[in-house]
Amino acid sequence: MQSGQMNTSDCSVCFKQILLRTMKAFDAFCSQHQLVYMAAYGTVIGAVRHQGLIPWDDDIDVFMDWDNYQRFLSLKDEAEKTGYSIIDRKNTGYYLPIAKFADQHTTIWENKYLPFVFGVYIDIFPLGYVQNVSASRKLRELYLKHSLLLTRAYTRFSWTKQDILFAIKHPMDFMDYLIQRKKREVHQKELDVLDGIIADIREGDYRLYYRSMDDFEQSLFKAQWFEKTLRVPFEDFEISIPAGYHEYLTTAYGDYMTPPPVEKQISNHPHYYLNLKEGLSLKEVKKRVESGEKLVF
């Protein structure tokens, strides 16, 4: 079994069952703690077009405004009691600019070169306000810059033949990976400052996920679309979506009700190591990988 492959239908079904179970737990956790969320990106399309997951998708995304997002992050201890973990940049080694709500009884190592493990998860994207479009564009560019450099700071090579060839062919890029390791705390602090600036923008005509790598205009949404939420069917339960979901999806995707061609109906989330039965530490996972284990379900 090569990394990134889940080549049995049984594995895919099991993964989606756990993913949906995690979303149910997340929805209940938000309800218990009076946290407002709304589905985002393909999860909204799935809810509207399929009344559940997009058939070929394997992740769930949600938006939270900054107030709810910060309260959510403050509830890590409460989440632990329910069998789930809240993961963000405060977790050493975590390389993404978004939070995750992850199942503690499963294990995913997504990228071989980014040694960090978590369970089957929900991605939580903080949605900020925009008062000045030009200023927000520059703010997003800074956020992306330091997010990408932080990811480089956490990148580790295993010195395989492929890694050595990369170092030889791209010596400047390789040196930059090594340099950024020493600047990890610098990038963390810069992102903390930017988080504070974004959180302090309390109103505006538009909303923006400041960490998005999508086209800026396609990431800029009218605030009124997110003022209220709707509860809609999603598989065998309900989730919250933006009341202005049609306008949001049309801006982000165009004709969102027409599925893409068959050749594009694929998942884009790799799994270097995947275990759907156990929650393991990185140290234990490395041992399993060295023994040749890549998939347990």
Image: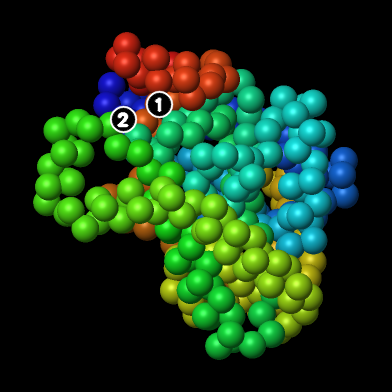
Q: Is residue 270 visible?
A: no
Which of pointers 2 and 1 lies earlier in the amino acid sequence? Answer: 2
Q: Which mark is residue 229?
A: none
Which kind of residue does numbered mark 2 sit on? Ser
**Residue 65 on image: x %, y %:** 73, 63
Q: Is residue 192 visible?
A: yes
Q: Judging from the image, what secondary structure is the residue with disc 2 in? A: loop
- Position of 178 compared to 18: left or right? left
Residue plotted at (74% across, 62% down): 66
**Residue 145 on image: x %, y %:** 45, 66
Quarter holding the N terminus is top left
Q: Are marks 2 and 1 in contact (CB under 8 Å)?
A: yes
Instruction: Check disc 2 and report the residue beneath it.
Output: 3
- Position of 93 compared to 127: left or right? left
| Residue nearer the viewer, 199 or 244 | 199
Q: Is residue 181 above or below residue 11?
A: below
Which kind of residue does numbered mark 1 sit on? Tyr
Crowdedness of circle 1 by 10 Å Cα count: few (<14), some, many (20+)?
many
**Residue 84 on image: x %, y %:** 70, 30
- Position of 119 compared to 39: left or right? left
| Residue nearer the viewer, 240 or 103 | 103
Crowdedness of circle 2 by 10 Å Cα count: few (<14), some, many (20+)?
some
Residue plotted at (71% across, 58% down): 64
Instruction: Check disc 1 and report the residue beneath it.
Output: 273
